[in-house]
């Protein structure tokens, strides 16, 4: 087989991490007809992913959005595994969606560089770490890039394909085409910048929303309503932060600040205190809003 990445070489996809993003990315891949391994170190994480995806699939059928045959085929293509090594050996395309920690990602990518077939692209879904940070550890830096999905990944159309200096054109083209085959509208980010494009746009809006609320100009609710009714956003900035998770928002802000050192990027202390109180947004039952 040709060792250059190519869409034709892809039949099996490995998604590492069965969390909020990984599980839905994997379902996108299965719906596109790929045999898809979801790998996680936690059996409970895999069980929870399976339950959510089966429930989602049943909901699609009940709503008449997908046929029973289509969801059965997709669910039948999903393989749940805790064994990274054997999954890596048979994967033609790998999307890492593990914990946002460089030391963990470095270990994973070093292993993938040894075990995955030569033609396999090693992508990361990371929103905070450009793939250049892990590329050298793989021994195939040209076949490494970010493939960044958005929450909820079964709904949001955008995928940011981010190249680093050594990413090859074949890697970019294959990743863009794979995203299209998953029903997405990929955009190409030509070089790494903290937050890429979407999180920078979102961050700018969030910063202004936090300023307006902190200054008592308008309530959270009214700021969110304005974003929805004046700008046509599907949800307001505070609702969106609660959806993304305040821990994630805080982590992105910290990572951006660590990289730029720019005072304008200083993380918001109000969000840090909510996180310290365990108020992480929807997933914990409360954040800016109460969901209980
Ligand atoms: N998983 C799967 N599908 C979901 C879902 C979920 N968690 N939540 C909603 N949906 C589906 C529903 O099933 C429904 O599908 P249908 O119309 O085909 O039947 C559709 O989305 C609309 O859902 P609802 O009617 O329940 O609610 P809304 O119309 O309010 O839509 C929303 C919900 C899609 C989340 C919408 O509010 C939205 O687009 N919000 C903005 C989301 C956004 O900006 N995401 C990006 C976050 S940034 C990020 O992820 C980057 C990372 O690096 C931090």
Image (cartoon, rainbow, N blue to C red):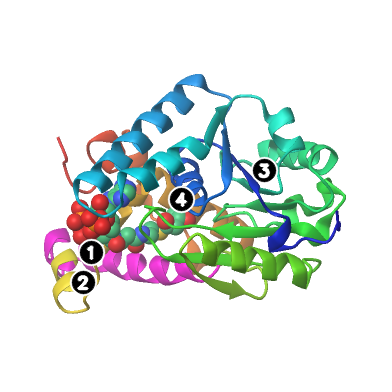
Residue at disc 1, secondary structure: loop
For marks 4 and 1, the one nearer the N-term is 4
What residue did someone put label 3 on? Answer: 102
Residue at disc 4, secondary structure: helix
Looking at the image, residue 48 sits to the left or right of residue 166; the answer is left
What residue did someone put label 4 on? Answer: 31
Looking at the image, residue 95 sits to the left or right of residue 249; the answer is right
Give the prevailing secondary structure in the magenta stretch: helix
The picture places residue 110, in percent across and down from the top left corner, at: 80, 40
State the separation of the CA atoms marked 3 and 2. 35 Å
Q: What numbered label is drawn on residue 236?
A: 1
Part of the protein shown in magenta: 196-223
What residue did someone put label 2 on? Answer: 227
Q: Which callout, 4 or 2, points to the residue nearer the camera?
A: 4
The picture places residue 92, in percent across and down from the top left corner, at: 71, 48
Looking at the image, residue 212 sits to the left or right of residue 184; the answer is left
- Identify the residue at horizontal 39%, vertical 67% (top origin): 202
Residue at disc 2, secondary structure: helix
């Amino acid at each position: 087989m040709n060792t250059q990445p190519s869409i034709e070489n892809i039949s099996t996809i490995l998604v590492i991490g069965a969390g909020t993003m990984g599980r839905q990315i994997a379902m996108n891949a299965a719906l596109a007809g790929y045999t898809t391994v979801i790998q996680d170190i936690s059996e409970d994480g895999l069980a929870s992913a399976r339950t959510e995806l089966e429930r989602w699939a049943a909901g699609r059928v009940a709503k008449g959005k997908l046929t029973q045959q289509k969801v059965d085929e997709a669910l039948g293509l999903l393989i749940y595994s805790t064994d990274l090594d054997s999954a890596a050996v048979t994967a033609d395309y790998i999307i890492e969606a593990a914990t946002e920690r460089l030391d963990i990602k470095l270990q994973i990518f070093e292993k993938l560089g040894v075990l995955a077939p030569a033609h396999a692209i090693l992508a990361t879904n990371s929103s905070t770490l450009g793939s250049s940070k892990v590329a050298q550890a793989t021994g195939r830096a040209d076949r490494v890039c970010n493939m960044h999905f958005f929450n909820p990944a079964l709904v949001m159309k955008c995928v940011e394909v981010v190249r680093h200096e050594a990413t090859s054109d074949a890697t970019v083209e294959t990743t863009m085409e794979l995203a299209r085959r998953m029903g997405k509208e990929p955009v190409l980010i030509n070089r790494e910048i903290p937050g890429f494009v979407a999180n920078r746009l979102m961050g700018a809006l969030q910063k202004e929303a936090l300023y307006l609320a902190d200054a008592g100009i308008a309530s959270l609710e009214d700021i969110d309503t304005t974003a929805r009714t004046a700008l046509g956003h599907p949800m307001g900035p505070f609702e969106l932060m609660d959806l993304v998770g305040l821990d994630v928002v805080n982590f992105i802000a910290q990572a951006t600040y660590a990289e730029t050192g720019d005072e304008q990027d200083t993380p918001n202390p109000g969000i840090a205190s909510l996180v310290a109180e365990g108020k992480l947004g929807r997933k914990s039952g409360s954040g800016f809003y109460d969901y209980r």
